[in-house]
Image (spheres, grey):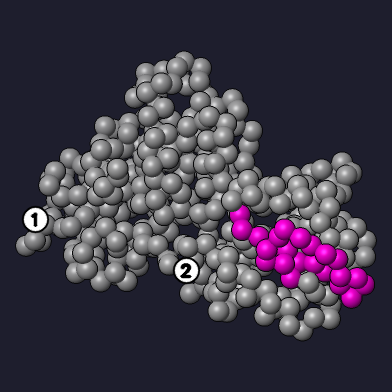
Amino acid sequence: MNTLKSNRLHIGIFGKTNVGKSSFLNKITNQEVSIVSDIAGTTTDIVEKSMEFLPIGPVNFLDTAGINDETELGSKRLDKTLSALKRTDIAVLMCDHEAIGEYEKKLIEEFESFKIPFVIIVNKTDISKPLIDGYKNVIFTSVLYDEELIYKFKDELIKLLPDEFVNSPKIAGDLIDEGSTVILVIPIDKEAPKGRIILPQVQTLRDLLDSGCKVVCVRDTELKQAINDLKIPPALVITDSQAFKKVAEIVPENIPLTSFSILFARLKGDLKAFVNGASAIEKLQNGDKVLILESCTHHAIEDDIGRVKIPNLLKKKTGKDLVIENFSGHDFPDILDYKLIIHCGACMTNRREVLSRILTASRNGIPITNYGISISYCLGILPRALKIFELE
């Protein structure tokens, strides 16, 4: 099975126009992925290429537009380029024999601001080789002629790999002992595609099997019988957030309980930050704006969790007349007018993008939480849902 894009190492390629970004990507992938031209601004949008990049593993390259196109269209391209930073695990800064100038320094400031490790590739050194002082992880090359470039690049990437790609984090397998029994509660409702179960549930199931656990999958309607059928109580029950209230009433207090969305809050983001953000629900006032943020686009259904269920829970919990707005996709809207951001489970995006959104919210003093945490908070069961994590 192909590795999901959200689980791949995202490598963003940045730099001015015509420094060789697209040529570099084509060289590394050994394919004509990006159009190469002497005309400045040939790359107009982010070009993505997923591949197996051994020995590193599955990666997703992001080839971005040049940052020095100062036309009106160039400004829009720049916005797209900077938005790619939010998904970038490791950045590649391409420059030519003119080396590090004003535009490159601005990019480096952005990398450091979002704590993104980066490699500097100085291209066109067949023309001249500049001196670059004060920077680590620098490769001098001529992309078109350097047959050793891919090996040099891999060596630098290995040095910069984020910890989650070196030591793959668990979704739930680290919370219980090997050999334990775990019950997954998977309601079959409008949110579940016909013939399939949704991605977080599939990934959690695989994680538990890899961790040597026995897994029982049931609908909420069969949960009580499933617990009674077990000779030893389950070590953990994991439920879809939408069934949280019903499941919490069925599962005895001595059995740990949490949700897929809360597990993904830990896997894809910062669980403590999301928990702290949920406390802002109590402070919401009439007219306050709440942003519900989804990583992927989809057709909303009649009882959509982000457009119907969570807004209804918020209004019921607060008793306030709130302004609820939804936003989908990789771009991050202007957030300054919002009093709270509620992020989806992020199963379709990478951790770097979620962390960058948390960082942006924090810098602007705006609390941020996620679907599962906000739902359990509104239902009054958040402390129980977090007990398994032993948060300090």
Residue at (67% x, 80% y) in the render: 151
Q: Identify which residue, 200 or 18, lies in the foreground.
A: 18
**Residue mark closest to the camera, 1 vs 2:** 2
Residue 136 covered by magenta stretch: yes
Q: Residue furthest left?
A: 231
Q: Is residue 334 left or right of residue 272?
A: right
Which quadrant holds residue 157?
bottom right
Which amino acid does the dot numbered 1 rest on? Asn
Q: Nearer the viewer, residue 91 or 331?
A: 91
User: Residue 53, located in which quarter of the rendered image?
Assistant: bottom right
Could you tell me how far apart the alpha carbons at marks 1 and 2 are, in whole angstroms? 40 Å
| Residue marked by disc 2 | 166
Residue nearer the viewer, 351 or 238: 351
Q: Tell me, yes or no, if residue 124 can be seen here.
A: no
Question: Is 109 displayed left or right of 164 in the figure?
Answer: right
User: Is residue 289 within the magenta segment?
Assistant: no
Which residue was labeled with disc 1? Answer: 228
- Is 381 displayed left or right of 207 in the figure? left
The picture places residue 269, in percent across and down from the top left corner, at 46, 49
Location of residue 286 with respect to 38 vertically, above or below: above
Q: Which residues fall within the magenta stretch?
A: 116-139
Going by the numbered disc 2, the residue's amino acid type is Val
- Identify the residue at image location x=29%, y=63%: 173
**Residue 231 image position (x, y, % from top left):** 6, 62
- Count of all numbered marks drawn on residues in the image: 2
Element type where label 2 sits in the image: helix
